[in-house]
Image: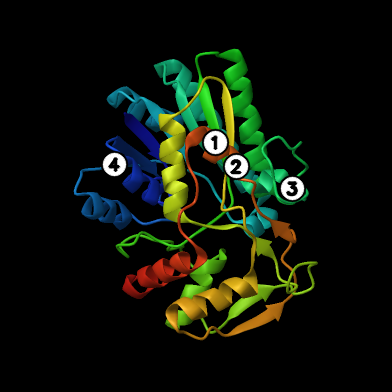
């Protein structure tokens, strides 16, 4: 298939491009590079030894995205493009609502115009709000604790309504948990602009000496050691989940959790990183971060049952691969 990957130069998007190409698909990437770099596309080419068509375009620019649809016979879309930092979304809600919702609406509109009927959406476990763990796809969604999560939940509702109005349109909503790690080559990984918002690249930059110490947001949660618990999953497992989702897309709305089904606390992840890479990580406990919840992990049995997909890599693999990339990265 010819697959349009929005946000394809980003962290999860670039790894998914690799997985798609290795599965025999052709990839067209649209990315505005607001939190990614153009040389990531070159690295995807190096890993796969295949060409990647790339457009530096913002998905909220309908006229420019329309030309991409016009220029290519697109079979399906995997939509990653969007702002993604929980803390920043609390500080800049209008930026998040505009960017994330308008992009989804424009892509949905162009799918109808050009008869593109396969759409995989990069959703998030944040749509579950402060539900009871483990999170299951059949749960009623609670109000999320931050605007980022709200944009994901609202995008899901938009796409669901588009399916209702257009029965030929099929959507897969992938609610994934906390992607970490990097491609085994060390060529692509998580390389945020500025100070990282996510835990693993923060830990890796402390290990490298780029940052002095890790800030752990809160140690008074009702968890195993007081720090927040998340379902960390290797980014290549996530990427392979997207390939499975678009290849096995059934009619209507399909919803899948992509996670390991196991929760790991912040301090447990730090310990695993130290063990995997024989490096000591300095950290300090600071106040809780606005919008965070205590625990978040998946029931991922539906994806295994219906997509034939499950996470194959463990927390040590995630830590080793993340550090391999960070050591090689010169950004």
Quick check: 292 left or right of 80?
right
Residue 149, horizontal then vertical, whole percent: 67, 46
Q: Earlier in the sequence, mark 2 or mark 3?
A: 3
* Residue at 28% from the left image edge and 52% from the top image edge: 44
Q: Secondary structure at mark 4?
A: helix
Measuring 36% from the left and 68% from the top, which residue is drawn there? 325
N-terminal label among 2 and 4: 4
Image quarter in which the N terminus is found:
top left
Q: Which residue is mark 1?
A: 305
Q: Where is residue 52 drawn, in percent x and y?
A: 25, 42
Residues tagged 2 and 3 counted as in contact (Cβ below 8 A): no
Marks 4 and 1, how far apart in space? Answer: 24 Å
Q: Are marks 1 and 2 in contact (CB under 8 Å)?
A: yes
Q: Disc 4, disc 1: CB below 8 Å?
A: no
For label 3, the residue is 129
Q: Are marks 3 and 1 in contact (CB under 8 Å)?
A: no
Which residue is under mark 4? 21
Q: Is residue 107 visible?
A: yes
Q: Nearer the viewer, mark 3 or mark 1?
A: 1
Q: Helix or strand or loop: what does disc 3 sit on? A: loop
Of badges 2 and 4, nearer the viewer stands 2
Residue at label 2? 301
């Amino acid at each position: 298939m010819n697959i349009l990957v929005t946000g394809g130069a980003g962290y999860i998007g670039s790894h998914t491009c690799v997985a798609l190409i290795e599965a025999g698909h052709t990839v067209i990437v649209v990315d505005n590079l607001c939190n990614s770099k153009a040389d990531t596309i070159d690295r995807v080419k190096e890993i796969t030894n295949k060409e990647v068509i790339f457009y530096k375009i913002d998905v909220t620019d309908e006229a420019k995205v329309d030309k991409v649809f016009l220029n290519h016979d697109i079979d399906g879309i995997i939509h990653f493009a969007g702002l993604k930092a929980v803390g920043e979304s609390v500080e800049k809600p209008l930026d998040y609502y505009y960017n994330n919702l308008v992009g989804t609406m424009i892509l949905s509109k162009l799918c109808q115009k050009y008869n593109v009927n396969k759409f995989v959406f990069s959703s998030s476990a944040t749509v579950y709000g402060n539900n009871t763990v483990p999170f299951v796809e059949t749960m009623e969604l609670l109000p999320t604790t931050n605007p980022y999560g709200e944009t994901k939940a609202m995008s899901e509702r938009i796409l669901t309504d588009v399916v209702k109005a257009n029965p030929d349109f099929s959507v897969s909503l992938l609610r994934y948990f906390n992607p970490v790690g990097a491609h085994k080559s060390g060529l692509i990984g998580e390389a945020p602009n500025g100070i990282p918002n996510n835990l693993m690249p923060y830990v890796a930059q402390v290990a490298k000496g780029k940052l002095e110490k890790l800030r752990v947001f809160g140690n008074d949660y009702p968890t195993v050691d007081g720090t927040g618990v998340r379902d960390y999953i290797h980014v290549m497992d996530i990427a392979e989940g997207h390939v499975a989702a678009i290849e096995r897309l059934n009619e209507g709305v399909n919803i899948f959790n992509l996670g390991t089904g196991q929760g790991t606390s912040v301090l447990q992840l730090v310990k695993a990183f130290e063990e995997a890479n024989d490096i000591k990580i300095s950290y300090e406990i600071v106040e809780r971060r606005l919008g965070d919840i205590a625990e978040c992990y998946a029931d991922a049995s539906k994806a295994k049952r219906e997509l034939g997909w499950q996470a194959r890599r463990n927390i040590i693999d995630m830590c080793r691969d993340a550090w391999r990339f960070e050591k090689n990265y010169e950004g």
